[in-house]
Image: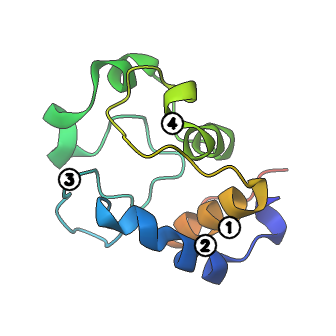
Amino acid sequence: MVATAKAEDGAALFKKCAACHVVKKDAASGAAPNLWGILNRPLAAQADFAAKYSDALKAKGGEWTYENLAAFIHQPKGYIAGTKMAFAGVKDPAEVANIIAYLRSLADSPAPLPN
């Protein structure tokens, strides 16, 4: 769904996420990690947020692939039990795809779209 998703719609949806997350290159993390360049970044890898990640997120391992990010945005505590993220999640798959399309656009070199 990300291939046909609309980043501009995702930007509007992301406003609720912006209460905790910043998405600017080289900006300091706030209450939650900076999500600039999140796609294909290892989980729990934002350096200035390292001490604040939950043990569950640190232990999960892997990268923020399209699939992993979608699962986390959809239901954070269902994807990583023990996460500190209090947000309940986004239930609509089209909205999740739009948010991911927006996050994909926030990188020096956007991640290739999934096949």
Q: Earlier in the sequence, mark 3 or mark 1?
A: 3
Q: Earlier in the sequence, mark 1 or mark 4?
A: 4
Residue 6, relative to residue 115: is it above or below?
below
Question: Which of 28/108 is in front?
Answer: 28
Element assignment for label 3: loop
- Position of 47 with respect to 86 (left or right) is left
Q: CA distance from mark 2 to mark 4?
A: 18 Å
- The percent coordinates of residue 43 (x first, y second) are 41, 34
**Residue wearing tag 1:** 98
Residue under the point 81% across and 65% down? 3
- Position of 18 with respect to 114 (left or right) is left
Residue under the point 58% across and 71% down? 102
Q: Earlier in the sequence, mark 2 or mark 3?
A: 2
Label pair 3/1, CB-CB below 8 angstroms: no
Q: Earlier in the sequence, mark 2 or mark 1?
A: 2
**Residue wearing tag 2:** 10
Residue under the point 20% across and 57% down? 29
| Residue 20: mark | none
Q: CA distance from mark 3 to mark 1?
A: 23 Å
Q: Residues within 10 Å of mark 4 (few under 14, many from 20)?
A: many
Q: Earlier in the sequence, mark 2 or mark 4?
A: 2
Q: CA distance from mark 1 to mark 4?
A: 17 Å
* Residue 1 visible in the shown view: yes
**Residue wearing tag 3:** 31
Residue under the point 18% across and 35% down? 52
**Residue wearing tag 4:** 76
- The percent coordinates of residue 101 (x first, y second) are 65, 67
